[in-house]
Image (cartoon, rainbow, N blue to C red):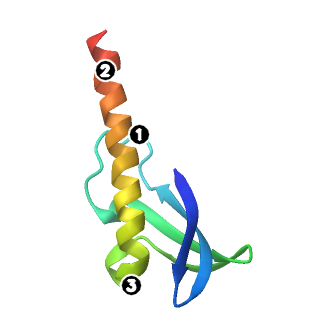
Amino acid sequence: ETSGRIVHGGKEYEYAVYSRYPSQKYWSTDRSAWIVLYDDGRVFTASDDWSTLPAEIVDPIRKEYRALKNEEIRKKFESMDS
């Protein structure tokens, strides 16, 4: 759903967030998506329980992911109005 780069422990990783329920209309909990960190193309860590990952990883990703989901929801409501 979203991806980018993030610094953790002084090292840069690529990350991706994958929704467990792509048809889900509302972003509800951290357990609704996986965070996967890649180190040079290899999986470094993956978790569907965001509370197990350090805040310096989770907080910026959560903020971006929420914004993305909120934008999806806004577009769905706008399309229903027309």
Regarding residue 49, the answer to whether it shows in the image is no
Residue 28 place in picture, x, y as percent: 25, 54
Q: Please report whichever mark, 2 or 3, sits nearer to the chain's N-terminal start.
A: 3
Q: Which residue is mark 3?
A: 54
| Amino acid at dot 2 | Glu
Q: CA distance from mark 2 to mark 1?
A: 17 Å
Report the residue at 45% width, 45% height from top: 22
- Around disc 2, counting alpha carbons within 10 Å, would you say few (fewer than 14), some (14 to 19), or many (20 or more)? few
Regarding residue 22, the answer to whether it shows in the image is yes
Residue 1, relative to residue 31: is it above or below? Answer: above
Q: Which residue is mark 1?
A: 23
Q: Check contact, mark 1 vs mark 3: CB within 8 A.
A: no
Task: Say which of 32 and 79 sits in front.
Answer: 79
Q: Which residue is mark 2?
A: 78
Q: CA distance from mark 1 to mark 3?
A: 28 Å
| Amino acid at dot 1 | Ser
Indicate left or right for 5 with 32 as reference. Answer: right
